[in-house]
Image (tube, helix red, strand yellow):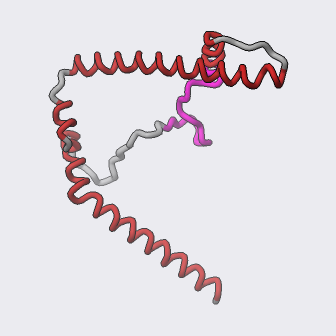
Amino acid sequence: MSKIKKQWDTVPNWAKYTLYTVLGIAGAFLLGLLFGNLIMWLWNWLMPSLFGLRTIGFWEGLGIFLLAKLIFGFGGSSSSGEGDKKHHHGKRHYHRRSGEGEKHDWKDWEYYDDWWEADGKTAFHAYAENMKKESADKTEEKSEETTK
């Protein structure tokens, strides 16, 4: 595990939450500045010449951005034809296999980074090579069947 991760684990929770809050507010402010100016610039570049509309200022650009987010959504889960199931992109889901009766000790995950550096990369690349070989073998078998 990296030194920074170990040091971060010693920081009190109240300090972490305070830092996350400050960074969240600062990020929202900066994104508002970015998107407000971006929409203002794009509008003033395209709309007057294409449709004869007037130019807008920063606050109007920010308002258009917020209105578009309200109308079209805030980037929540996407529907891919699987009913009401929600997908959380970027999150890992760990499912218990049938027959697995042991209790999971999530504290062990703190050793994951060390394991990945020591053994994980090698094991993964060996697995990937085996899968590629199996795929190539299946493709070869299918091509032999079609030629018969």
Q: List x then y, in percent, for residue 58.
A: 62, 12
Residue 4 found in image quarter: top left
State which quarter of the image contains the C terminus.
bottom right
Residue 83 found in image quarter: top right
Q: Is residue 72 magenta?
A: yes
Q: Is residue 108 magenta?
A: no
Q: List x then y, in percent, for residue 95.
A: 36, 46
Q: List x then y, in percent, for residue 7.
A: 16, 32
Name the residue nearer the viewer: 10 or 40.
40
Which residue is drawn at the image coordinates 60% and 81% (left, top)?
Answer: 143
Does residue 140 lie above or below 54 as drawn? below
State which quarter of the image contains the N terminus.
top left
Which residue is drawn at the image coordinates 54% and 81% (left, top)?
Answer: 141
Left or right for 131, reference 60: left
Does residue 146 lie above or below 16 as drawn? below
Q: For the view shown, which residue lies furthest in the bottom direction?
A: 148
Q: Main secondary structure of the magenta part?
A: loop
The part of the chain drawn in magenta is: 67-87
Name the residue nearer the viewer: 93 or 13.
13
Name the residue nearer the viewer: 7 or 142.
7
Q: List x then y, in percent, for residue 93.
A: 38, 43
How many marks the image carries: the answer is: 0
Which residue is drawn at the image coordinates 39% and 20% (left, top)?
Answer: 24
Left or right for 139, reference 50: left
Which residue is drawn at the image coordinates 53% and 33% (left, top)?
Answer: 77
Residue 40 found in image quarter: top right
Does residue 40 lie above or below 3 as drawn? above
